[in-house]
Image (spheres, rainbow, N blue to C red):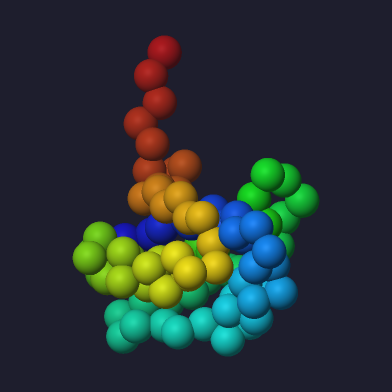
Amino acid sequence: MLFATHLTAQPGMFVEAIRALKNPSVPSGVTIREYLGVFSSNDAIIIFEAPDEATAVEFVGHYAEWFKTETAVAFPVEGYKWTR
């Protein structure tokens, strides 16, 4: 499964948050596709693969000390069935 997590650094924790991004703790079964810094209301986005939601929660939970997180299941647009 593919996931997209938006991360916003907790107030006063930006330096520690960036350090956590640069040295991730990645559980077995998780493959990181992209770490992206962004200029938006979020500070970063992580695109990753995990075998299931439980593993994704374990991975994202590592960032809860430094970031507010929001995670969504992601789908390639080629898989969408468009309607008229």
Give me the residue at 48% from left, 69% from top.
Answer: 65
For residue 46, say whether it is visible: yes
Give me the residue at 72% from left, 55% from top.
Answer: 38
For residue 48, say whether it is visible: no
Query: Quarter holding the C terminus?
Result: top left
Rendered location of residue 83, percent (x, y): 38, 19
Residue furthest to the right in view is: 39
Q: Is residue 55 left or right of residue 12?
A: left
Q: Relative to 8, does residue 66 appear above or below in the rendering?
A: below
Nearer to the camera, 31 or 17 = 17
Rendered location of residue 66, percent (x, y): 55, 68
Counting every numbered tag in the picture gives 0
Q: Is residue 31 left or right of residue 21?
A: left
Residue furthest to the front in view is: 12
Q: Is residue 10 left or right of residue 1?
A: right
Rendered location of residue 80, percent (x, y): 38, 36
Q: Relative to 10, does residue 75 appear above or below in the rendering?
A: above
Q: Relative to 27, does residue 6 appear above or below in the rendering?
A: above
Give me the residue at 60% from left, 76% from top.
Answer: 21
